[in-house]
Amino acid sequence: MTVAMSQYETLSAVQTARGAIDDKKGEDLILLDISEITPVADYFLIATGSNSRQIRTLSEEVERAVKEKFGVGPLSIEGLAQAQWVLMDYGDFVVHIFDQETRDFFNLERLWSDAKRVS
């Protein structure tokens, strides 16, 4: 069951995910507002984990924190088996957690360079 969130709730949920990643020592967090350039989602949250174990931990912590505060889970989670790039789709926002090599290769920040960075 999905629950529609307001724009304010979406931003708050993304900030909750960001805090969860930061609390578990995720690195190089970037929040992009993509709402004006694509209908895919409103935000991309991009982070780096130091190894597959940490990447799994970061994704589990995001899922726990957002569920606890907003009562919603991701629509889907991709990439947990290899944990080089975990994608968590919440509908209005997407969380990308990479290892450094994969993040450098795909370089989402460059690909979505027209997006606004949210501090």
Image (spheres, rainbow, N blue to C red):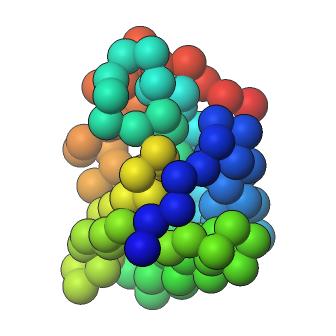
- 98 sits left or right of 15 in the view: left
Q: For the C terminus, give its image quadrant.
A: top right
Spot occupied by residue 92 in the image (x, y as percentages of width and height) = 47, 45
Q: Residue at x 46, y 24 (%)?
A: 35
Spot occupied by residue 52 in the image (x, y as percentages of width and height) = 38, 80
**Along the viewing direction, whichever of 36 and 27 lies nearer the viewer:** 36
Spot occupied by residue 95 in the image (x, y as percentages of width and height) = 46, 55
- 52 sits left or right of 71 in the view: left
Q: Which picture quadrant has residue 85?
A: bottom left
Q: Residue at x 72, y 39 (%)?
A: 8
Q: Is residue 27 visible?
A: yes
Q: Is residue 67 above or below residue 107?
A: below
**Along the viewing direction, whichever of 13 and 7 lies nearer the viewer:** 7
**Along the viewing direction, whichever of 39 and 80 lies nearer the viewer:** 39
Q: For the N terminus, give its image quadrant.
A: bottom left
Q: Residue at x 24, y 44 (%)?
A: 105
Q: Is residue 52 above or below residue 22?
A: below
Q: Is residue 29 visible?
A: no
Number of marks in the rendered image: 0
- 58 sits left or right of 7 in the view: left
Q: Residue at x 70, y 48 (%)?
A: 9
Spot occupied by residue 28 in the image (x, y as percentages of width and height) = 59, 48
**Along the viewing direction, whichever of 40 and 28 lies nearer the viewer:** 40
